[in-house]
Image (cartoon, rainbow, N blue to C red):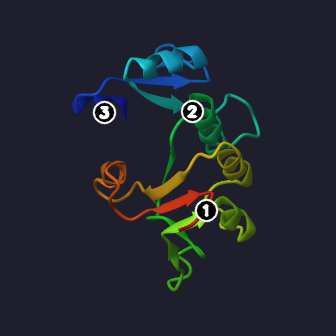
Amino acid sequence: LQTAIEREGAAARVLSAIPMPTVCEAYIRDKALDHLDKGRVVIFAGGTGNPYFTTDTAAALRAAEMGCEALLKATRVDGVYSADPAKEPAAERYDRLTYDDVLRQDLRIMDGAAIALARDNRIPIIVFSIKSQGGLASVLKGKGPSTLIEGRTS
């Protein structure tokens, strides 16, 4: 991912809570903020380095720590559905949901701790497909199929 971002002309750094000095930098909050201040894209890897925390919770935690404007959740489907669309062809895809909708309906797109952490820090979550060609680029441009999870629907 770092290489792809740099090919497009942006500087990027990978930071990990699990030390891997030959692969990437160690995650230190101040270092991450410094990279962001310098206009670099920061990619967080390796979760939190603690057991019992999912990568979803790690992503929400890092988004809160960094003061991110949004959290992008790449998955195998193009948004949040009422049921697994692979098992339920009639499953409905949602364009927008609230954090509480996701928790109340037990939609399981992310674990409950991650949803609650994003909610408590008012960080919108954008769920999109990583499998579609150009999916990330489309979402970054505000286009393409996705689901927005935030505090309220309009």
Q: Which residue is mark 1?
A: 152
Could you classify mark 2 by the number of other residues whose Cα lies within 10 Å: few (under 14), some (14-19), or many (20 or more)? few
Q: Position of residue 14 (x, y in %)?
A: 46, 25
Q: Is residue 52 left or right of residue 18?
A: right
Could you classify mark 3 by the number of other residues whose Cα lies within 10 Å: few (under 14), some (14-19), or many (20 or more)? few
Q: Position of residue 150 (x, y in %)?
A: 58, 57
Q: Earlier in the sequence, mark 1 or mark 3?
A: 3
**107 over 12 or under it: above or below:** below
- The residues tagged by marks 3 and 2 sit, at their Cα atoms, a distance apart of 21 Å
- The image quadrant of residue 78 is bottom left
- The residues tagged by marks 1 and 2 sit, at their Cα atoms, a distance apart of 20 Å
Could you classify mark 1 by the number of other residues whose Cα lies within 10 Å: few (under 14), some (14-19), or many (20 or more)? few
| Badge 3 element | helix
Q: Position of residue 15 (x, y in %)?
A: 51, 23
Q: Which residue is mark 3?
A: 5
| Badge 1 element | loop
Q: Amino acid at mark 1?
A: Arg
Residue found at x 35% / y 48%: 140
**38 over 47 or under it: above or below:** above
- The residues tagged by marks 1 and 3 sit, at their Cα atoms, a distance apart of 32 Å
